[in-house]
Image (cartoon, rainbow, N blue to C red):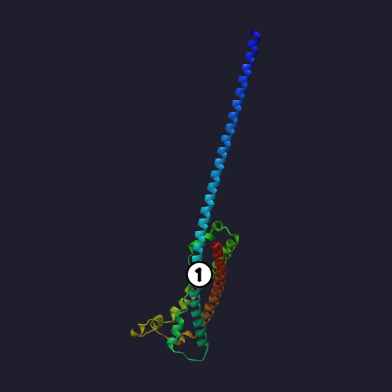
Amino acid sequence: MKVNETRIGTRDESKGFEERSETGQRSLRNLLIEGLVIVASILLAFAIDAGWDQVREREQEQRLLVQLIGELDLYIDRLGPAAQRRTDTVEADSQWLLQAIHGAEEHADDEWLKAVASLPGAFEFSAATPVFNILTADGGLQLVSDPKIRDELSNVSSWLGVARRFEELQGDFIANELNPWMSRNIDRYASRRLRDPNGAEGPGSRFDPGVASLRTRDFSNLLVERQNRLNLVKMFRYRTLERMGVLREMVQAELAE
């Protein structure tokens, strides 16, 4: 009996050990499964967040590109033509004045004064463009996914920077050289009377020195320099507008997709 009891006890202990071992294995499997489920949930959450981030980034890019189109439209359709009109006027008047200075033909005072009045005029083509500045600032280009659009944005930024610099040089010339000479030699009151529809009703100028004051070497040189500065501004404005047109087509194509 003792032998049998010993055998039965041994079998029972073995059976209990196997049951505990099986239970432990099931617990370990369950823990592994739970762990895998948790990891998968975390990865899924990260994937969803990344997906939403991509959606938000794409929406932000779309908004910026739409606003960029608006700024390019402003340059190409409004500022460009307005700048060209002002440039054409200054070019025509400065050329007329040069011919009048060096030619034998006499001209009435009102013709001289009207032509002189346009010379200080300078159109600021490089107006403020907030979205364009954002996209071309440090890190801003990364907001645009298309590498070709990024490259063209860089091109436009370069041309616009050069155009802005020559506009500044033109402005310095007008402020520091042309305007002081005109203030010493041109009666601006007489010139304003010609441009003002009601100006003729006021008294005539007692300081108008007449056209003889314009027939000087200094004024002729100033006119030539005015043309030179304006030609440089024109050239870089044209190149800038040309690249802006290319960029606008690229952005429109991107938005249409």
Q: Is residue 220 left or right of residue 22?
A: left
- Foreground residue among 254 and 181: 254
Q: Position of residue 45 (x, y in %)?
A: 53, 44
Seen at 53% across and 76% down, the residue is 230
Residue bearing mark 1: 75
Q: Quadrant of residue 32?
A: top right
Say left or right for 239 vs 123: right
- Residue at horizontal 53 percent and vertical 78 percent from the top: 227
Quadrant in which the N terminus appears: top right
**CA neighbours of label 1 inside 10 A, class few (<14), some (14 to 19), many (20+):** many
Residue in the foreground of this view, choosing between 33 and 2: 2
At 49% from the left edge and 77% from the top edge, which residue is drawn?
Answer: 85
Give 234 or 192, whichever is nearer the viewer: 234
Residue 150 vs 211, above or below: the answer is above
**For the residue marked with disc 1, what is the amino acid?**
Tyr
Q: Position of residue 233 (x, y in %)?
A: 54, 73
Q: Residue furthest bottom?
A: 105
Local SS, label 1: helix
The residue sitting at 62% across, 21% down in the picture is 17
Quarter where residue 35 is shown: top right
